[in-house]
Amino acid sequence: MATHTLYQFATSPFCAKVRKILDFKGLDYRVIEVDYLERKELIVASGQLMVPALTLDNGETVVDSDRIAARLDDLFPEPTIFPAEWRGIHLALARYFDTEFEDAIFRAALPDEIARFARQGRDREAFYRFIRDRKYGPGFCDETVANHAAHFARARALLAPLDDTLRERAFILGRIGYADFALYGQLSLLALSGVLKIPTEMASLRAYYGRLDRITAALDPNA
Ligand SMILES: N[C@@H](CCC(=O)N[C@@H](CS)C(=O)NCC(=O)O)C(=O)O
């Protein structure tokens, strides 16, 4: 069977999205956990510093989760992540999950993300903080950890309408599609500590996360 190679950081929501699409499509792949400080294999394979990057079995390397998803759906159209006539809506919703929504969830999850890097070593934690503070401004990490309750409240306000929507349907637009994979990726930030931090009263959203999380490999149509 073909083997593709995914370059990832385990905590990246965009990598979680791509892993789940690969699983949904039943594609065989190996994961290279890129060292946050060094990134050598990633640079050699993709010529840049961001994950996810996917090297396909044909040798082609694609960077950026949107582009990877589109390429995978072109090459391996069944099962599709873009249900007919719903592509534009899935792309628009995924864009929201990957930007405005991500901004809130990532801040709510920052203490857990920093803790994960800290477990890998003080140098990785320091570099992670450095990258974040450089992007968002000096003191960003300290402020975000100190004001965790407020950041979590902002995330909760964005999660609540999704929990409502999912009371009536299995996936965000009914049938599974790209927006679900994008949302799954962002929600995975709330599971970084090993405990799912989607608020317990949001039972539908928690069940939805579980449904997506359990997609692990191809369903054998002959089984
Ligand atoms: N738009 C990109 C975003 C990818 C992205 O932000 N990746 C982050 C990890 S979540 C990254 O590689 N950051 C580099 C760094 O932290 O130095 C996508 O959809 O793939």
Image (cartoon, helix red, strand yellow):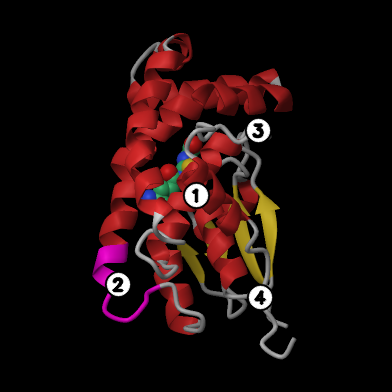
The tag on residue 218 is 4
The reply to whether dot 1 and dot 3 touch (C-beta < 8 Å) is: no
Q: How many marks?
A: 4
Task: Looking at the picture, tell me which residue is in the foreground, 105 or 10.
Answer: 105
Q: Quadrant of the N terminus?
A: bottom right
Of the four image quadrants, the one with ligand 1 is: top left
Label 3, secondary structure: give it.
loop
Q: Marks 3 and 2, how far apart in space?
A: 33 Å
State how far apart marks 1 and 3 are (Cα).
16 Å
The residue type indicated by label 4 comes to Ala
The magenta region covers: 82-90
Does residue 45 appear in the picture of this structure? no
Is the CB atom of the residue marked by disc 4 within 8 angstroms of ligand 1's nearest atom? no
What amino acid is labelled 2 in the image?
Answer: Arg
Q: Earlier in the sequence, mark 2 or mark 4?
A: 2
Residue 101, image x, y percentages: 34, 40
Q: Secondary structure at mark 2?
A: helix
Residue 198 coordinates in the image, percent (x, y): 51, 35
Residue 92 inside the magenta-drawn segment: no
How far is mark 4 from mark 1, CA to CA? Answer: 19 Å
- For the residue carrying disc 2, how many other residues have a C-alpha within 10 Å: few (<14), some (14-19), or many (20+)? some
* Quadrant occupied by the C terminus: bottom right
> Is 83 inside the magenta-drawn segment?
yes
Q: Which residue is mark 2?
A: 87
Residue pointed to by mark 1: 185
Q: Is residue 216 above or below residue 101?
A: below
